[in-house]
């Protein structure tokens, strides 16, 4: 009897540790930088389970640095490329900023930092437009550096850059010793441990040196951990082959290790957080529909209804469709549909009922944030909805729809 009890206790201890490790990995994939004085309890927990956490992260293509007052997860870097419209995404501005900080003094004005970053971008032949999307991407990268403790805001805030002032009164402190921990492990170093490619002299070469993993399995699993959904249309040939032949088995194993569920179909796949996991900070920041993501209840409910409309009545396929299974409609049709819905749903917020184009903008921001929507520009913008969006819809309770503006007014279901 004691042997049986001992075996049961041992299994329980192993299961308990697996749950702790899974929770830590989920947290670390969403928060890749823990620093002493702010995250002491988490750092201590990682130290206790360092070997197991490191093994799981390696399966996701990540490496782990554990020091007494620092935990750093090195995540594979996406290729540094330009988005449609010649706008550089947040990742490009982030790494350009990292590249120029090495050559700046410990204290620098925000305008000085921004000027150096734009000069590096110009040298790398990245268009510098000073447009609002560019400013948002630049500020997002600066915020990330502040969150990681590489920059400290001594006076003012980096968000002041959005006010349109060329040199806002913002003073920053640069923690140069932490810059090395920002670098992906794939960045080539010379024999003396210095960067093989000088970012100040060759910013374009620096961006190209941020390699992705060579193993397609690691790349796809890493995408699953990073994104709300992975679309097959975005994969290269080797990644598509792995997706079609090995995802069901190996992806499910990774999902189980993380305490998540793998959902996949021909057009893509996603790691889904079970309802029993209440921590929103797992594998990124997107949970849908969610109060912090959707803004008002009006936006969340209108988004769900628009998904129903596009999946049911939208056109399928076309020259601008991102891939198979995407359904879409002209932007004017989207606004017109929202106007019709606003007449029926009298509890929606007044400004959205009166200006459905404003509501459409909020919905677009929400869906694009999870890559569930892509808008093709042209004579008239065309909204393309991801096949993955079909898993969210409005569900009736006891034959009737609960008030959609209440917290329990919507739930999710997976559609085939």
Image (spheres, rainbow, N blue to C red):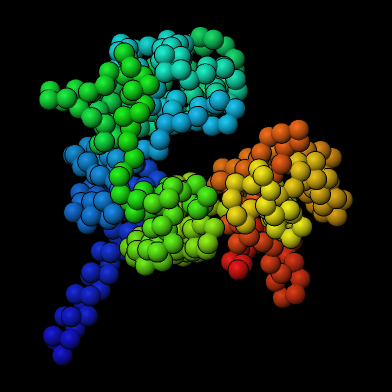
Quarter of image, res 405: bottom right
Residue 24 % position (x, y): 32, 53
Q: Is residue 131 above or below residue 405?
A: above
Res 359 → quadrant: top right
Q: Is residue 245 above or below residue 354?
A: below
Q: Is residue 133 left or right of residue 359?
A: left
Q: Position of residue 102 (x, y in %)?
A: 29, 17
Q: Position of residue 319 (x, y in %)?
A: 67, 44
Front one among 403 and 299: 299
Question: Which quadrant is the N terminus positioned in?
Answer: bottom left
Q: Nearer the viewer, residue 10 or 239?
A: 239
Residue 406 spot, x, y in % from top left = 69, 58
Q: Residue at x 22, y 23 (%)?
A: 196
Residue visible at 44% across and 25% down? 93
Image quarter where the C terminus lies is: bottom right
The residue that appears at 60% across and 62% down in the rendered structure is: 391
Image-quadrant location for residue 201: top left
Whether residue 259 is visible: no
Kindly give the residue lying farthest to the bottom in the view shown: 1
The mark total stands at 0
For residue 344, say whether it is visible. yes
For the point 46% across and 14% down, which residue is it? 122
């Amino acid at each position: 009897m004691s042997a049986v009890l001992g075996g049961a206790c041992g299994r329980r201890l192993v299961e308990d540790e697996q749950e702790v490790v899974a929770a830590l990995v989920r947290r670390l994939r969403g928060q890749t930088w823990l620093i002493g004085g702010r995250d002491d309890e988490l750092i201590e927990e990682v130290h206790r389970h360092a070997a197991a956490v490191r093994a799981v992260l390696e399966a996701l293509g990540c490496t782990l640095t554990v020091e007494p007052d620092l935990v750093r997860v090195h995540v594979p870097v996406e290729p540094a490329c330009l988005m449609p419209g010649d706008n550089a995404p947040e990742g490009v501005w982030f790494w350009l900023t990292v590249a120029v900080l090495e050559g700046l003094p410990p204290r620098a004005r925000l305008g000085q930092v921004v000027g150096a970053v734009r000069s590096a971008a110009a040298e790398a032949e990245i268009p510098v437009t000073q447009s609002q999307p560019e400013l948002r991407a630049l500020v997002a990268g600066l915020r990330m550096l502040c969150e990681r403790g590489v920059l400290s805001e001594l006076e003012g805030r980096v968000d002041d850059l959005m006010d349109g002032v060329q040199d806002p009164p913002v003073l920053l402190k640069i923690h140069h010793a932490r810059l090395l921990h920002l670098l992906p492990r794939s960045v080539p170093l010379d024999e003396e441990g210095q960067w093989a490619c000088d970012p100040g002299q060759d910013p374009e070469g620096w961006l190209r040196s941020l390699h992705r993993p060579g193993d397609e399995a690691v790349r796809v699993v890493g995408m699953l951990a990073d994104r709300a959904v992975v679309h097959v249309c975005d994969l290269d040939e080797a990644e598509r082959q792995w997706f079609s032949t090995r995802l069901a088995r190996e992806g499910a194993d990774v999902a189980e290790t993380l305490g998540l569920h793998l959902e996949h179909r021909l057009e893509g796949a996603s790691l889904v957080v079970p309802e029993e996991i209440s921590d929103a900070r797992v594998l990124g920041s997107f949970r849908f529909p969610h109060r912090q993501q959707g803004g008002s209840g009006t936006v969340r409910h209108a988004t769900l209804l628009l998904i129903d409309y596009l999946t049911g009545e939208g056109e399928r396929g076309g020259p601008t469709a991102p891939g198979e299974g995407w359904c879409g409609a002209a932007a004017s049709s989207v606004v017109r549909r929202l106007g019709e819905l606003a007449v029926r749903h009298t509890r929606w917020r007044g400004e959205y009922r009166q200006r459905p184009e404003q509501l459409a903008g909020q919905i677009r921001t929400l869906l694009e944030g999870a890559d569930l929507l892509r808008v093709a520009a042209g004579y008239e913008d065309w909204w393309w909805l991801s096949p993955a969006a079909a898993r969210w819809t409005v569900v009736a309770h006891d034959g009737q729809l609960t008030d959609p503006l209440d917290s329990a007014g919507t739930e999710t279901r997976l559609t085939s």
